[in-house]
Amino acid sequence: MDKKNRIWFYTLPPATYEITCSQCGGSNLWWSEYENHIWCYDCEIDFNPEYGEHAGIFSGPIPIQASYMIGLVFDRFNMETKKVEILNIDTYEYEDYSTIVPSNAKLNLLGHKDNYGLWIAEKGQKSIKCDLFNLVREIRSKYKVE
């Protein structure tokens, strides 16, 4: 079976999603150049975790809203356009990074830091309407984070 070249990858590393190597069980991984495959730096293999024990959170339903509340995002880097795309958790559509708040993943790739984690927590809290939203707003105000 021929492997198809990947056209995008998540901006967070595979280990963030609890993916482990199918050979050594390790987490020294990155997204393979091939679709549906992961590269293990230790074993020097490409493997397809499919939906088994090594697929991490991708082996079952993913609570997107709850994931964003803890900073687990599904932003991706489009290798064809060379742009970061942000998953809009209201529409479940990907949007061009330049049209919305900068993502932590993109800024980390560029060596910068920002308040994306707080923005994600705020978005998650808005959707479930709990008091943590106000706490996040107070923290942002205290540290003058826009």
Image: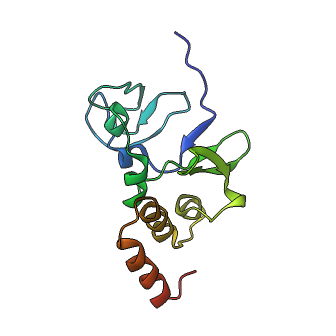
- Number of marks: 0
**129 lies above or below 58:** below
Horizontal side, residue 131 vs residue 80: left or right: left
Find the residue positioned furthest to the front. Answer: 129
Residue at image position (55%, 41%) is 9
Horizontal side, residue 37 vs residue 57: left or right: right
* Front residue of 10 and 28: 10
Residue at image position (30%, 28%) is 22
**Visual colour scheme:** rainbow
Residue at image position (41%, 43%) is 14
The quadrant the C terminus occupies is bottom right
**48 lies above or below 110:** above
Picture coordinates of residue 85 (x, y %)? 63, 49
Picture coordinates of residue 7 (x, y %)? 64, 34
Horizontal side, residue 15 vs residue 9: left or right: left
Q: Quadrant of residue 48?
A: top left
* Front residue of 43 and 93: 93
Residue at image position (64%, 51%) is 84
Q: Quadrant of residue 4?
A: top right
Picture coordinates of residue 39 (x, y %)? 44, 34
Find the residue positioned furthest to the top. Answer: 1
